[in-house]
Image (cartoon, grey):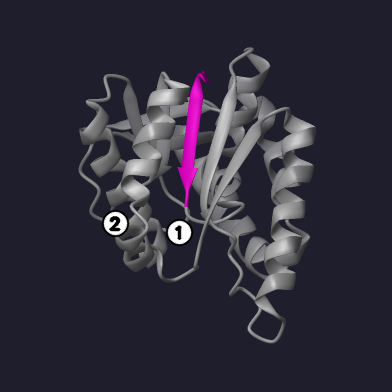
């Protein structure tokens, strides 16, 4: 069993989208498990995909050890999550894991995220939850800037954890060209959401159920 289940497309997505909330939950004694659909192996076209996959798995394991959390890789091909999910019956696999872990809360990508893989994971999560008639909470988060989300917003004060969140992002050294590009948007959003939540830094989630 786990208290919090984070379901994402690539290694590092959950740290960018909700790293502060993960740190807060862990400090409160809650257990956290992350399900990662792909290795993110296509992030460096000039390097063999197997090498990038091993590197990103290693970075994730390092983070798992630091945070005392667990991660599960599905091993789907980056950019082909929708297609492979249909042929490999990934929705059923995810539904079985949800039944096994019985999470109180599930976090995943918002359906409005511009990244194709992120939207694919969102749909698979929602389909799996229907299969198991999930009764807990489902919240979604943003990695890239989004527009048009109409679900109710929930803010979490991450002020005590914000600097550590940025440090966790930097653990994904293989992705530094993406991570460093995200630093400014992450800080900007955290400050904006903090003002909306009457604190210094916050993360925003969309409550789906």
In-image side of 138 versus 33 (left or right): left
Residue drawn 59% across and 20% down? 31
Picture coordinates of residue 189, whole percent (x, y): 50, 47
In-image side of 59 versus 123 (left or right): right
Q: Quadrant of the C terminus?
A: top left
Which quarter of the figure has residue 32? top right
Q: Residue at the far bottom: name it.
A: 46
Alpha carbon separation for disc pair 2 and 1: 10 Å
- Residue hosting label 1: 144
What residue span does the magenta drawing correspond to? 1-8
- Confirm whether residue 140 shows in the render: no
Measured along the vertical axis of the image, is residue 41 above or below residue 45? above
Picture coordinates of residue 105, whole percent (x, y): 41, 24
Residue drawn 70% across and 80% down? 48
Q: Mark 2 Cα within 10 Å, few/some/many (few <14, many 20+)? A: few
Residue drawn 61% across and 23% down? 24
Residue 3 located within the stretch drawn in magenta: yes
């Amino acid at each position: 069993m786990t208290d919090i289940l984070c379901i994402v497309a690539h290694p590092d997505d959950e740290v960018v989208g909700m790293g502060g909330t993960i740190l807060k939950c862990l400090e409160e004694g809650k257990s956290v498990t992350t399900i990662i659909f792909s290795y993110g192996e296509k992030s460096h076209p000039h390097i063999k995909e197997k090498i990038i996959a091993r590197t990103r798995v290693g970075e994730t394991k390092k983070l798992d050890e630091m945070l005392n959390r667990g991660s599960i890789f599905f091993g789907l091909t980056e950019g082909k999550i929708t297609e492979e999910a249909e042929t490999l019956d990934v929705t059923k696999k995810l539904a079985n894991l949800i039944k096994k872990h019985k999470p109180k809360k599930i976090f995943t990508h918002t359906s409005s995220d511009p990244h194709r893989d992120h939207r694919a994971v969102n749909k698979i999560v929602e389909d799996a939850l229907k299969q198991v008639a999930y009764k807990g909470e489902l919240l979604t988060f943003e990695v890239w800037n989004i527009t048009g989300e109409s679900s109710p917003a929930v803010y979490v004060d991450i002020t005590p954890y914000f600097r550590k969140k940025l440090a966790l992002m930097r653990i994904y050294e293989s992705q530094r060209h993406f991570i460093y590009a995200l630093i400014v948007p992450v800080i900007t959003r955290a400050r904006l959401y903090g003002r909306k939540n009457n604190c210094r830094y916050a993360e925003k989630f969309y409550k789906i159920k």
